[in-house]
Amino acid sequence: MEYVIHLSIVSGIVAILGMSLNLIVGYTGLLSVAHAAFYGIGAYVTAILLAGFGVNFFLALLLGMALAAAVALLIGLVLSRFDDDYYVLASLGLNIIIYSVFLNWNTLTRGPLGIPGISRPELGIGGYRFGLTSNFSFLVLTLLCAVLVYLAARFITRSSFGRVLMAIREDEQALQVFGYRTVYYKLAIFVIGAVMAAVAGALFASYITFIDPTSFMLRESIFMLSVIILGGLANTNGAVAGAVILVVLPELLRFVGLPSNIAAQMRLLLYGLALVLLMIYRPQGLFGKYRL
Amino acid sequence: MEENILEIKRLTKHFGGVHAVQNLSVVFARGAITGIIGPNGSGKTTLVNLLTGMLPMDGGVIVSDGATLRRMRAHEARFYGITRTFQNIRLFEQMTVLDNLLVVLTERRVFASLFERHGAYHLKKAEALLRQVGLWEKHNELALHLSYGQRKLLEIARAIGTDARVFLFDEPFAGLFPEMREIVKRQLEALREQGAAVLLIEHNTELIRQLSDYVVVLDSGKLLAEGKPESVLRRRDVLEAYLGE
Ligand SMILES: Nc1ncnc2c1ncn2[C@@H]1O[C@H](COP(=O)(O)OP(=O)(O)OP(=O)(O)O)[C@@H](O)[C@H]1O
Ligand SMILES: [Mg+2]
């Protein structure tokens, strides 16, 4: 049972990352591989404030979201100068820059040593204090966040704003002629996606209780991309499905009797294989509404 | 109100050594269709690109409703009431026919658009436009699944759906079957009726003769001739520019 709860929590966190990245990549067509940077910002702000200053989780969460928004605004401005392949390369560079900050700002992040002893969230209502220390209560919190992100994504994609995002993906310059200042739309969705990723980061830090920079490397951004490519671009349900599949599927490898170290190796191999097969046989992903 | 809603003065654009548009001055009248003809590469599409800010101009000015513009950016075209279609059709391919229209009908401001959903009002407008060009049955199809002719019609409907007063049509008849040509003709005439300024780029001189109130002939980016279609289309230099290619 604990194991199922654990997988559900991880799936929930990955689903948040998938849904938010899908807004940027699937709907708007901005092929960003910098998403792990904002995930990391949410995680580090939470870790530092919880472990170092005993700040309440929910306050730390809000501050993490705010910092992610500010950084996303800056990064988004830089990225707005690039298109297509250059956009991918620039976002790749920016992910590496943020990762290096996590790795090298020792006084703040403890660098490669990471930050241990991050506490679980605590709710204080009146005089009562209630810690979400059990995994089950943490699952409830994770699912609540995931549902909120899901609803927000649906609200966005069903609005006129959401239609504009898709039109930017299809032909940005033609859209401009119809009176849209597309830069602002791109910035807005980039910031919104980053804020959502920061929520996932805060949950991750508090759940695992230890973080180090390796969780926020370029590799993680690419993992998030595979989640939405598998689930299908421009479909919020697809992002959730992709997250659950990519979290649960590798675990099944253990049940077929593979030792866990080999299973871990196999996992990467499987991701790669799944993506290649998908590109060949079903380029729109499982539930996709858009082909790259 | 002034009669001329759009005017260009000494408009110039070159690509390296190629003078695509040279010192071009033309007045486009409201409630009229201005035909623009000229051999391949004479600068017709470039003119449309300049007028919609899709290319920066190198010299000259655009005068719109009395405002003199030395530069135009793409998103400003709508502000000056200018819209267009594209010679090489540019639809929002992986969006439905309906969404292709709704996007020109709904809110342009970022924040407000987030809190807007298309309502009965937008739907009614989109439906009316799609019915005008015979595409309502296709409204749930992706644009990329339409036939070539239907795609041209959708582009025209999308342009008409904007609240523009200047319409730049870049070869809207090219490759269309006769019944679709009739639909396009009706749309252009309706716009003229409503007092819009319509620019029609077209190689078929018969269509130009039928539809345009005024004709502008370009050759190598320069004004070769202008005037009423009957007289311009009879001029020897105009015929030579065309037959000479
Ligand atoms: N973006 C560009 N970069 C470089 N050269 C260009 C560009 N656009 C147009 N040209 C050149 O400018 C000249 C005018 O081209 P334009 O497309 O305006 O002609 P056109 O009159 O529309 O021709 P057609 O009847 O074939 O559509 C041509 O020599 C063309 O090669
Ligand atoms: Mg042309």
Image (tube, rainbow, N blue to C red):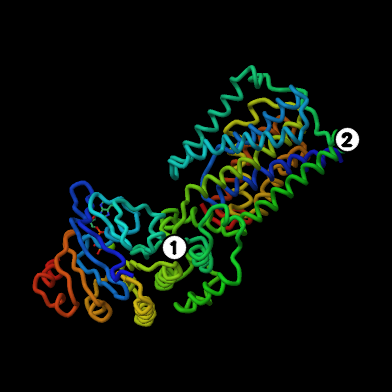
User: Residue B222: which quarter of the image?
Assistant: bottom left
Marks 2 and 1, how far apart in space?
Answer: 55 Å
Mark 1 burial class by Cα count in 10 Å: few <14, some 14-19, many 20+: many
> Residue A73: x and y, percent?
54, 39
Callout 2: chain: A
Foreground of the two, B9 or A233: B9
Mark 2 burial class by Cα count in 10 Å: few <14, some 14-19, many 20+: few
Q: Which residue is drawn at 61% across and 47% down?
A: A228
Residue hosting label 1: B91
Which amino acid, mark 1? Leu
In the image, taking residue B168 as reference, residue A102 lies left or right, namely right
**Residue at the farthest top position:** A107
**Residue at the farthest right position:** A128
User: Residue B155: which quarter of the image?
Assistant: bottom left
- In front: label 2 or label 1: 2
Residue B112, visible in the rendered structure = yes
Q: Residue at x 39, y 80 (%)?
A: B183
